[in-house]
Image: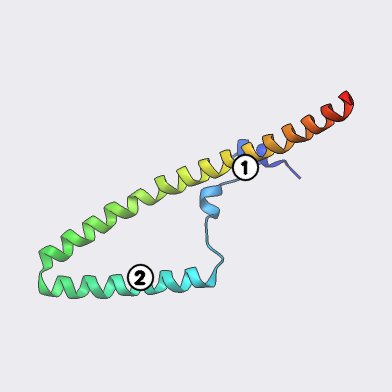
Amino acid sequence: MKSILQQLYDGELYPAEQLCSQLEEYREKRGQYSSNYENFLQKLSSMNPQLGEQFSQIMEEQMELIPYEGSELFINGFRMGAKMMLEILWQKDMETSEKIKV
């Protein structure tokens, strides 16, 4: 089996595409959101088609931001994980060197 780094390098691993919540609660809320959004958009469009179109455009612009946010969350999470590993390894090295000094 290839290492994770090798899979990333070879383009076989796509963390962004694997972002899918396994939580049932998330799926329920996502479905509820979609339903509420569609109902609201239909009501708004029936009252004022221009306003419905404008609202839809604003929501699309907001949705375009999500990949950027996901990217930043992934990068920050990865950095935090790497810092934790460095801290663990550094602490282990410090404990080992302290034992040797004694």
Pointers 1 and 2 in contact (C-beta within 8 Å): no
Q: Residue 27's x, y, as percent?
A: 48, 70
Position of 58 relative to 93 (above/below) = below
Q: Residue 19's x, y, as percent?
A: 52, 55
Position of 59 relative to 13 (above/below) = below
The secondary structure type at the circle numbered 1 is helix
Which one is nearer the viewer's eye here, 16 or 2?
Answer: 16
Q: Residue 97's x, y, as percent?
A: 83, 27
Task: State left or right for residue 22 relative to residue 27.
Answer: right
**Residue located beneath label 1 in the image:** 81
Residue visible at 22% across and 61% down in the picture:
56
The secondary structure type at the circle numbered 2 is helix
Q: Amino acid at mark 2?
A: Ser
**Residue located beneath label 2 in the image:** 34
Residue visible at 16% across and 71% down in the picture:
44
Label 1: few (<14), some (14–19) or many (≥20) C-alpha neighbours in 10 Å = few
Which one is nearer the viewer's eye here, 90 or 66?
Answer: 90
Task: State left or right for residue 47 relative to residue 64.
Answer: left
Residue extending farthest top: 101
* Quadrant placement of the N terminus: top right
